[in-house]
């Protein structure tokens, strides 16, 4: 058996750029009919249908999901990829920025899942896959808002998995490691700073959106029907041991 998305309806949020764009393109390459959602595509559409949608706004999500339901009549896979980074030490963090991180990163997952669940229940099946982060496992200094929001995604995932289990709908989260994108600017850091970050990895290279796409193709497929409520780490073994760089120095 091979993973086969022929005819499946896959919705990816935050798909205009970064990891989300690669996820949308990959599901399409695997045969799926892809609906891409983002704040704005600016004429640079992806997938069969691109819709402007703010995942943290229930009215915007309701309109987008109603259009998808009308056009396709079902949703097989929902990838809640959309997210923002809010950086800042707790001492200096603007409460409105803290609230925004929660509103988009976990609020968006909630609003999207709540809107899509009835469509999946109707079909007695589906896959919801949520972007958490390595920050939900080991957070960085200055990531209080972001890390708290991503840890909340993990716990939300477990609860939703329980609530949707009776319909055969699986709900999982994934924790990407360090993938250079516009969100984090890793690729633009000075060499020494890049090297220090890479020293935290067991597989000592930057992550690629394709690493996440490989995992999600599996999690969204028929092969993953007995996997639910989990957090899957796709971070190249970040801090799997305390000082992974020692193995490279010993080479
Ligand atoms: P990115 O900033 O390149 O892309 C995020 C996309 O989400 C953008 O297109 C943005 O417009 C969209 N978005 C933001 N707010 C939105 C909203 N309210 N409604 C709809 N769309 C919205 O970031 P990325 O690096 O591709 O990250 C994608 C996801 O992966 C995020 O959830 C991020 O937290 C997570 N993640 C990324 C990394 C990494 O190393 N890049 C690591 C851990 C987790």
Image: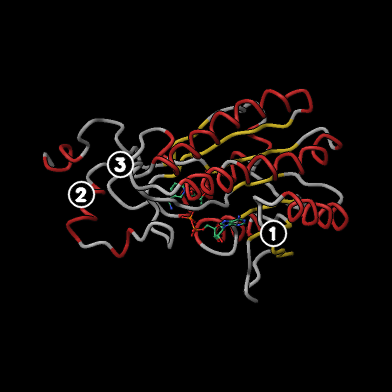
- Residue 52 % position (x, y): 69, 64
Q: Earlier in the sequence, mark 1 or mark 2?
A: 1
Residue designated by label 2? 196
Q: Residue at x 63, y 67 (%)?
A: 40
Secondary structure under tag 3 reads: loop
* Distance from mark 1 CB to nearest ligand 1 atom below 8 Å: yes
Q: Residue at x 66, y 57 (%)?
A: 54
Q: Earlier in the sequence, mark 3 or mark 1?
A: 1
Residue 221 against residue 97 in the figure, above or below: above
- Residue 136 % position (x, y): 44, 35
Residue designated by label 1? 53
Secondary structure under tag 2 reads: helix
- Residue 24 % position (x, y): 62, 58
Cα distance in 3D space between marks 2 and 3: 15 Å
Quadrant for the N terminus, please: top right
Q: Residue at x 71, y 54 (%)?
A: 32
- Farthest residue toward the bottom? 43
Tell me which colouring the rendered structure shows: secondary structure
- Residue 126 % position (x, y): 74, 38
Residue designated by label 3? 141
Q: Residue at x 50, y 53 (%)?
A: 84
Cα distance in 3D space between marks 1 and 2: 37 Å
Residue 213 against residue 90 in the figure, above or below: below
Q: Residues within 10 Å of mark 2 (few under 14, many from 20)?
A: few
Quadrant for the C terminus, please: top left
Secondary structure under tag 1 reads: loop
């Amino acid at each position: 058996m091979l993973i086969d998305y022929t005819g499946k309806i896959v919705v990816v949020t935050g798909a205009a750029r970064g990891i989300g764009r690669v996820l949308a393109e990959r599901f399409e390459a695997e045969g799926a009919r892809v609906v891409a959602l983002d704040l704005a595509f600016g004429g640079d559409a992806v997938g069969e249908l691109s819709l402007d949608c703010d995942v943290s706004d229930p009215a915007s999500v309701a309109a987008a999901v109603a259009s998808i339901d009308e056009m396709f009549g079902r949703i097989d896979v929902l990838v809640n990829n959309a997210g923002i980074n809010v950086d800042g030490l707790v001492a200096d963090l603007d409460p409105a920025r803290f609230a925004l991180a929660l509103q988009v990163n976990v609020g968006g997952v909630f609003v999207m899942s709540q809107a899509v669940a009835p469509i999946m229940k109707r079909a007695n099946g589906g896959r919801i896959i949520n972007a958490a982060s390595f920050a939900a496992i080991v957070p960085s200094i200055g990531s209080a808002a972001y890390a708290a929001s991503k840890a909340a995604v993990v716990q939300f995932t477990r609860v939703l998995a329980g609530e949707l289990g009776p319909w055969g709908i699986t709900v999982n989260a994934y924790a990407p490691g360090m993938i250079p994108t516009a969100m984090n600017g890793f690729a633009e850091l000075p060499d020494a700073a890049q090297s220090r970050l890479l020293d935290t990895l067991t597989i000592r290279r930057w992550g690629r959106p394709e690493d996440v796409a490989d995992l999600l193709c599996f999690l969204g497929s028929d092969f993953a029907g007995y996997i639910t409520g989990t957090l899957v780490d796709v971070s190249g073994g970040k801090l799997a041991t305390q000082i992974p760089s020692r193995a490279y120095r010993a080479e």
